Amino acid sequence: MAERQAPLQAGDKLTFLLSLVPFLMDHDRISVGEVAAHFGMKPEQIRDAVRLIGVSGIPGETAQYQHEDLFDISWDDFEENDQISLTHRVAIDDSPRFSAREAAALIAGLQYLSALPEHADRAAIASLMAKLSRGASAAPSQLAVEASDTDETLSLIRDSVTAGVQIEFDYLNSRGERERRRVDPLRVESLDADWYLRAWCHLREAVRTFRLDRISAPVVTAEPITHRAGDVGLPDTLFEGSDDDLTVVIEVATAAAPLLADYVPEGAETSERDGRLRTTVRVSHYHGLKRLIAAMPGVAVVIEPPEARRAVAEWAAAGAARYNDSAPTGG
Amino acid sequence: MSPASTASRVPVEERLFSLVLALLATDAGLTKAEILSTVQGYRQRYSRSGDNSNLERQFERDKDDIRELGVPLETIESPGESGNNQNLRYRIPRGDYELPADIAFSPEETTLLNLAAMVWREGSLSAESRRALLKLRSLGVTSDDPIVGYAPRLRVRDAAFEPLSAALEKHVIVRFGYLKPGEHDARTRTVAPIALIQHRGRWMLHAADQDAKGTRNFLLRRIVTPVTTTNTRYEPFPPEAMTAAIAELEQIWRDRTALVEVVPGSDAATRLDKRRGTETAPDGALTLHFSDLDLFADELAGYGPEVLVVSPPELRDAVRSRLTRVAVDHG
């Protein structure tokens, strides 16, 4: 196994080496720190790569890797001043092409972003995609992502994040309560087709996540925000557990289990039998749970506690009852 | 010390880097024997008189790994010696390796590509994006402004995605068990993948069904067995096949509509009203577009009593029976 896994990591390192050489060729003398910042890597990773490049080359006419067949750098300047200058180069003249899959990943990412308010210039995106295709070593793989929906709410919120001003809106939470909120918008996030705002809520005096499709009547204020993402320790994950969360045992078809992954706490006990997985999920209240489970009919069932089962049963039964009209209930 | 243990001192990335350099530097190409006996990382393990089969296998794997990174490693036959494997020559043609000189990216484009790469946070597409960005950095352009307060994300949670995307890349036929809604047993499908498409937040495989003789769309979440990759290759489809598939999905979505009543002010009223293409009648009833009746019925069932489907009758029945099922499961 180790033999097969190793090349993956090595593949990243190889790509980096092949990318670093042309970059160094364009810079007569550059510090390790600058290169690290540019490539988003650690200084030690840059030093390792430079040391390797400095002793690499081609077999050459003698097939003996003679001095003139190797890259060379100013070793003293490198060791003493942490500066890189390439003094001799071989084989490489230019940056490598993208692979078909690399180009496809970026093109699909662009497709997804293409409808967003700040990318109104569709022609510019199309030309960028064409460039990626032309810069790939083979036709990009057939991967497509539908452009994300966009509306005025998203563009207003984006503007307020950029401007650093507070925003106000009506929010309907999953309990069905509607309140006017004033928030410090910190980050706009999406997961596939759904958009969220992470913000400091002045009403709750805490960081909250708001679904954009539950926001109505947004108004951007002139008031600067009072909390910043760095100050409030905005977590990376969208769905945060809290100590007040309720724990619920559910059974879900194994194939559908990934759909609930956001709700399963780390280290949750799970057991599998007959293609069904029994696990624990964490929810902030049963109002959210009933909506979640009712949208997975036949796939997920709440096992305990009884109150949670009852909340789901009542929700679904009330829904079904709407179809009975004049017909007697109880069937 | 045995040759193998000496060779383990040459790191994998050094061997791969040396191989790329050697093959870029040769116009005529190198034979396998020349590579194994002279290139850094192989030559240490090469035996002039003995058996080099392990080393040959290593070279075969390295070739695959390098090609997967987008390096166009090509094989040429020596004139008059076709069919003689030992005399095949290997090289990397510079023109196919290097990014064309006229391809450059502006700071604005670089910002956009950074964001497009960020969209993939997990799975192989995230690794592909990371490598693509290294190549982009190689060109030395920096983005005009860092992306703050913005985190769009696409997820690939279906287990079938990775094997299907690999098969799409290699143009090989795959087989999997597909469970259609309303059927009890999964049926094995043998298909030639044409494209992976995310539509309305769900991943779909557009493929040529080898038994049904036609193209079909398969929802990845309904693939209920591991995907088996065969060795049978198929002729790659033209890019128009994917464009046509997307247009067809869009057309289906446009053609299928449902009329629903929603409880005013409810979660359903707020969120469904914001779906793309929704029309609101004067009496508050919503006309909604959908692609897949079963998935849409699941979604509507989640709203419980907040939604009453008026038409079409199949959707009305589907939602009603789902709600009844959930109520029974939790009774």
Image (cartoon, grey):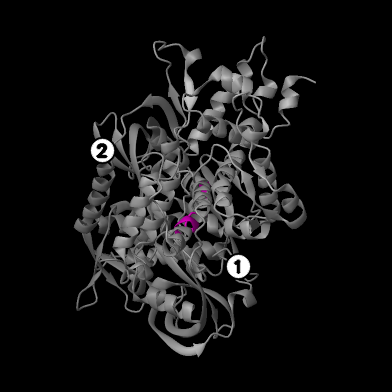
Which one is nearer the viewer's eye here, B115 or B267? B115
Answer few, some or many: residues within 10 Å of disc 1's Cα (few below 14, many 20 plus, some between 14 and 19).
Answer: few
Q: Which residue is mark 2?
A: B215
Q: Quadrant of residue B109?
A: bottom left
Image-based side of A4 in relation to A216, left or right: right
Image-based side of B41 in relation to A191, left or right: right
Q: Dividing the image into 4 quarters, which one contains the C terminus of chain A?
A: bottom left
| Magenta segment | B116-123
Q: Mark 1 is on which residue type?
A: Pro
Q: Residue A75: x and y, percent? A: 73, 47
Q: Mark 2 is on which residue type?
A: Thr
Q: Quadrant of residue A10?
A: top right
Marks 1 and 2 sit apart, C-alpha to C-alpha, by 44 Å
Helix, strand or loop at label 1? It is loop
Chain that bears disc 2: B
Q: Residue furthest bottom?
A: A222
Q: Which residue is mark 1?
A: A235
Image-based side of A233 in relation to A164, left or right: right
Residue B249 higher or lower than A218, as above or below: above
Regarding residue B263, the answer to whether it shows in the image is: yes
Q: Residue B196: x and y, percent? A: 36, 45
